[in-house]
Image: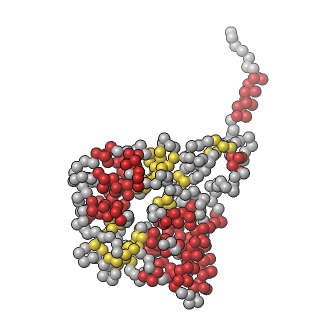
Amino acid sequence: KRGRREPDMEKAKKIAELEERVTPTSPPRRGDENVTFVDSAPLEKGPLFAGKPKEEEESQQQTKHSYTPSKSRKPANRGQQLSNQTSTSSSIGASVDGCIDDCRKAIQDFTEELTCYDLMADNVKIVIFDTELKVKKAFIALVQHKIRSAPLWHSRRQQFVGMLTVTDFINILLQYYVAPDQTMEQLEEHRIQTWRDMSGSTRPETLLCIDPMFSLYEGIRILLSKRIHRLPVIDSFTGNATSILTHKRILHFLYINLLENSNLAALNLPIKEVNIGTFNVKKIYPHTEIIHALELFSKYRVSALPVVDDNNVVVDIYAKHDVFNLARERTYNQLNESVQEALQYRQNEFEGVLTCTLSTTVKETIKQIVGSNVHRLVIVDEEKKLLGVLSLSDVLKFLLGFS
């Protein structure tokens, strides 16, 4: 009993009250009293985060966006509405040019009502590379994640500075390839920033990107006018990359939400009549060396090369993303191999070359592209001989009237 003290009931009561006050029974939520949430402030140079009370942001709702997509703006029945509006005018003997103008006006209005945010999927995965990462590891990571590009983050400058794509991989191979089976030490050891410094004269000084709340029409305009295939969507308020806008995703979105149930007369015209597609395209043969195909990719800025036999019949296609197989199989120092040998490394999901003819309608080509999840169709005649290529950008240029 020596040294025993009676508990101080008054002090214990105060401690209990204090613990009850500072330890909430449930996680705090926005709107709760005495709870202040701190969000990031808008930045002028790079996403360096600075605390800012949420209340200060409320007064800027008209200029600073909140990520709450408006369900009423989702184009659930928009295609049917446009069908009802345009079916009457298009059935009264309208000219081809008039049908095309009506179609483009409807699609332009549709894309101007939506934002780039509305195009984002519910679950988006973005792989971001630091510019200090080694080039070889970066391209192997692209292959492992089954993606074709990644934004580049400059740690010292604390901002996004560019994109790493298969085009960079092609240019690096062309730069450092010397002879078969000879190790390309630069590819093994160089970092991404080293390669960017070496090719800096051909690169823009800043990353071309778009804010999620800009109109979808503006995003399409940038993609087509700048002749790029990927446009990073970066939140100007936080500096975070949210998604990447691509031709493929845009066309899928337009078809499902607008074109599939639409009776726009221009969509029923054959591609020959509306002059869609690229003709006099570059082609290769099964025995063409990989190094020559890479040179054609780089020189003419094409995304795919039809493979034909001696009779000009299409037998396969070698696309830019097939070059990633060289990184997967570690055969990037054997560029003297033939394209036919390189295509053997292609994964099993390839279903063959998808083709169309000049008499195929616009809507049928879009349905085939979306349904098969491809980036292009090869235009052939009745004997399967090569005539041209119909790419995603060709379709979008026609739909929106971009030259």
Residue 76 position, x and y percent, is 60, 70
Residue 125 is left or right of residue 356, and the answer is right
Residue ID at (71%, 51%):
58
Query: Observer-nearest residue: 153 or 244?
Result: 153
Farthest residue, direction top: 2
Farthest residue, direction bottom: 93
State how the image is colored: secondary structure
253 versus 103 height, above or below = above
Farthest residue, direction right: 10
Residue 367 position, x and y percent, is 46, 74
Query: Observer-nearest residue: 201 or 58?
Result: 201
Which quadrant: the N terminus? top right
Count of marks placed on residues? 0
Residue 161 visible from this viewpoint: yes
Residue ID at (57%, 43%):
48
Q: Quadrant of residue 352?
A: bottom left
Residue 357 position, x and y percent, is 38, 80
Residue ID at (41%, 51%):
200
Residue 71 position, x and y percent, is 64, 63
Residue 316 is left or right of residue 96, and the answer is left
Residue 348 visible from this viewpoint: no
Query: Observer-nearest residue: 72 or 333?
Result: 333
Residue ID at (28%, 45%):
185
7 versus 172 height, above or below = above
